[in-house]
Image (cartoon, rainbow, N blue to C red):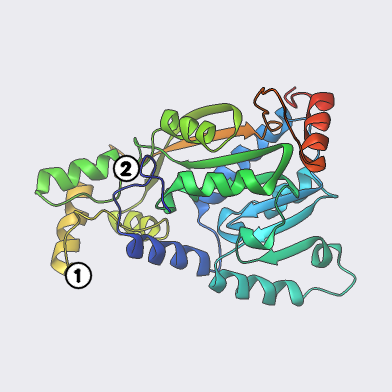
Amino acid sequence: MADSTTAREIDAAALDRAARRISAARDAPWLHAEVARRMAERLAIVRLQPARVIDWWGHAGAGAALLAQAYPHAERVAIETPAARAARLSARNALPWWSPARWREIAAVDVSCVAPGSAQLVWANMMLHLVRDPGVLLQAWHSALSVDGFVMLSTLGPDTLKTLREVYREAGWGPPHAAFTDMHDLGDMLVRAGFADPVMDQELLRLTWASPDALLTELRGLGGNADPGRHAGLRTPRWRSRLAAAIAERAGPDGRVALEFEIVYGHAFKPPPKVSVAAETRLDVDAFRQMARGGRRGRSLS
C-alpha cells in the first residue's frame, strides 16, 4: 500500500509509459550518463567495498561501466523493466563464454529476485522521479541491504524545467510535467524508510541546444508529462509549432535555447536494528549477529 505522505499526485499509467520508453531505448540519455559520472565520483567518500551491488534501472541509469571500475570484484544485479531486460540479456549472451562481464552480472526484473539483506550498495541513478511513490521504493531498498550497506541515488529536483513552466504558464496551458520532490523531503523519506545519516545535496545544470526541435526531441527521451492536470488528448502539429516558437523567443545571444535541470544527490546507510528496552528482550540469531557486526564496523564514511 502506498504511503500517503510520499505518494505524488500523478498519472501512474503515463509515468509507466515514459519509464518503459526510456528503458527500451538503445542508449541511455546523455544526461543520465553525465549524472552517473558525477555520482560515481562520490563513491570515494565511502570506505565499504560491496560484494554485491544492486544497479536499479541498470541500462537507463548508465552506471554499469562506472560501477565495474569502482568495484571490479563485486557482483552486479541489474534491476530492469521486462523490455530493457530482454535487450540487455541478448547483448550479454553475445559475449564470449569466458568473458568476466558475462558471469559477474545477474539480470533481474525486480527486487524480489534479491534476498533481503544480501547487497551492500543500491545504486539508483536518475530514476526516482519516475516512481509514483518513492517512499515505498526506499523501503524495498532498505530491505535489500545488509547492515552498514548504503544507497547512492540521484533524481530531478523542483527547479528542473523552470523555463518550460514559464512558457506553459504564459500560454495558459496546463503543467508541462509532474512535480519533482524537494531534496529535504527526500532526506526525510530516507529516514522514514529506516536509513541513517542521509546526506543530500544538489546542483543546477543548464543544457543548451541549437534549436527548439532539438531541445524537444531530447526532452522526450528524458520522460513525459504525467501530471493529472495536463492537457487531455493529443496535441497537434500546430500546437508544437507554437511551443517551439515560444522556446525560440528565449534563445540567448548565440541563438541557442536552454533548459535547466536540478540534480539531487543523496546517500544514506542502513543502521543495525534497534532493540527496545524491556524487562525481557528476545532476539533471533540473525538480528543479534547484525547488531554485533554493526557495532564492530561502525560508520563507513571517510
Alpha carbon distance from label 1 to label 2: 21 Å
Where is residue 214 drawn, in percent x and y? 35, 57
- Picture quarter with the C terminus: top right
Q: Would residue 3 be found to the left or right of residue 121 on screen?
A: left
Q: Where is residue 147 in the image (x, y as percent from the top left)?
A: 73, 37
Within 10 Å of disc 1 (Cα), the crowding (few <14, some 14-19, many 20+) is: few
The residue drawn where x is 72% and y is 24% is: 301
Write down the residue under mark 1. Answer: 234
Q: Quick one: label 2, few (<14), some, or many (20+) residues within 10 Å?
A: some
Give SS at disc 1: loop
User: Which residue is farthest left?
Assistant: 172
- Residue at coordinates 37% horizontally, 60% vertically from top-left? 15
Label 2: which residue?
161
Q: Is residue 122 above or below residue 150?
A: below
Q: Does residue 277 sit above or below 55 in this rendering?
A: above
- The amino acid marked with disc number 2 is Leu
